[in-house]
Image (spheres, grey):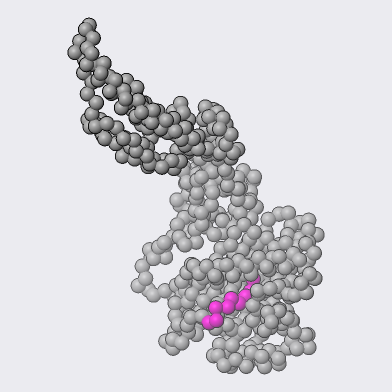
Amino acid sequence: MKSCAAGFTEWLLFHIWKRNDNTSCTCPYVLLPETVIYRLGKPFFWYYTDSNGQILRRAKSKVSHKYILEEFQGETNDLLAYYLGFSSLNKSKANSATIEFFTQTSLIDFIHNRDKCNTGILQRWVEPKSNQSSLIKVQWSQQFCLIERRTNKYKLDDPKVDFYEKLVTYEGMEHNSVIEPVTAPWIIAEIQKICVHVAAHVTAVTGGNVTVTRMVLFFKQDKQDKLWLMYCSALKVMDLSVSEFDQPVEFQELEVTVPKHIVLKKLPLDTKGFEVRKNRTLCVGCNYLTRDSMMYEIPLNTVVDFFEKGKTLPSQGVSARDSSRDSENKNDQVPKVLIRLNKSVTNNKYEEMKKDPTWDHLQIKVCQDCFLHFTQVYSLPKTKTFKINITEQSHIQNPEPSMKKNISERNLPCNVKILPPIRPKIKTSEKFEKHEKPSLIKAVSTKNFDKSYVKAPKSINITRTSDKEPDRGFEKQMASASKIAIPIYTKLHSKRNIMMSNVNTTISRMNVDLNNPGDFIQDTLALLKNTITKLET
């Protein structure tokens, strides 16, 4: 595999074109426009997606400039294709490319007259969804997926803007385009699905020997909301047959520029110098100024463990702000990231901080390159669960031993033994007023018996003249009163027995402890006892 975007794209297209033995299909969900791979300045492979969603490759006999012109010139658009050329002569520029956009006339000139690069990609132009050139960049790995969109500021049909000024996105200057976040949920889900299926398909067609661990892909959204795969700028795989892959691969950002004869407009002369550093943040990992939108949060313990394992970043910027170089000899055990965050951290404080449990909850922001490098050799830790919450909940749910005893004595189901006794609210009848003597004694109404009334005499006057001298009139009054009171007492006594039995039954059904009755039961029993006591006396 060649270490350039053309080599990565060629390798990836070859593997997603191969058919899976289990499904007899190519990689699903991948839409690929007419893509021609150039080798040694000549067309070598031609891939595309047919109407059935299958990735096909043309025969060698049809991969020529003649068929390329016939296929590409069939479009009615002003823009037909673009060419991404790589020069492998200079090793220092192995990861740099030149992009060219072709119209009807310029494509013919490129095919017949122009010299081509050693390796390159010629791809059909895909009309963007809006009237502005746009490209989606996806950085995928098994741990995360970063998605961003860069859109050109100018409209495609603006005649006042130069040809390349309104087409470049990642290839042009920063002031020509704007980075926008991808917020549509369906786009995020679709891109993640495509990346997962690409990685799974590569593993399947290689018999499990090759696993894609990281890749950087570029997509374009057309007017029908279809996502087309453009090219792959970086790729990292784990090949079991190669033992040298144990060392991590340093990812380098692909530098795409326009041809030298194309001159893009510079920033106006009246532009203030501070605007270049506007919305920039100094990354604590590499010490470079980075856009705020390109900063990502990462746990601090992840970064510390990265340096604890003896890993280092590929390169770090040197800035006048970085005064940590003076204390490198004194605090050689402290990572530079912590020194940039807090210059007062020493070796002793660093050892104490590692023992602090709050270390796991700290978050810092680093640039995109540092985030990718930190996560490619270290997997994020799993979230920890706190057992103290479970213990507290068990104390709340489990009742006291006395409560368990009261419940078990009533032979309740087993699943009720973990809950406290339930005391439902029962509507009571009207209460008696103490200062009045009612003519009707109204019994308490429950679900188990109906309302009943017992008639009482309006008044019973019992008087006694003297305790020493018996009074015959008093005995007559007692005899006459007993004739009235005894039948009433008999009826009340029988009613009292019925009511007590019904109350006991109700108490047992309500699962109420008699040693600790509720307000309703307590009031009812007190009322009955007072009534019976008055009648007995």
Q: Nearer the viewer, residue 494 or 318?
A: 494
Q: Which image quadrant for residue 292?
A: bottom left
Residue visible at 33% across and 27% down in the picture: 531
Does the stretch in magenta take in 425? no
The correct choice, above or below, for 197 with respect to 286 in the image is: below
Magenta stretch: helix, strand or loop mostly: strand
In percent of width and height, residue 119 lies at: 69, 77
Left or right of residue 171: residue 452: left
Does the stretch in magenta take in 228? yes
Left or right of residue 43: residue 338: left
Total residue callouts: 0
Q: Is residue 388 in view?
A: no
Q: Nearer the viewer, residue 445 or 26?
A: 445
In percent of width and height, residue 448 lies at: 45, 41
Residue visible at 73% across and 59% down in the picture: 238
Q: Is residue 461 in view?
A: yes
The correct choice, above or below, for 38 with respect to 279 in the image is: below
In percent of width and height, residue 265 lies at: 45, 78
Identify the magenta region. Answer: 223-232
In percent of width and height, residue 34 lies at: 66, 83
Residue visible at 36% across and 36% down in the picture: 443
The correct choice, above or below, for 388 with respect to 71 in the image is: above
Q: Residue furthest left?
A: 465
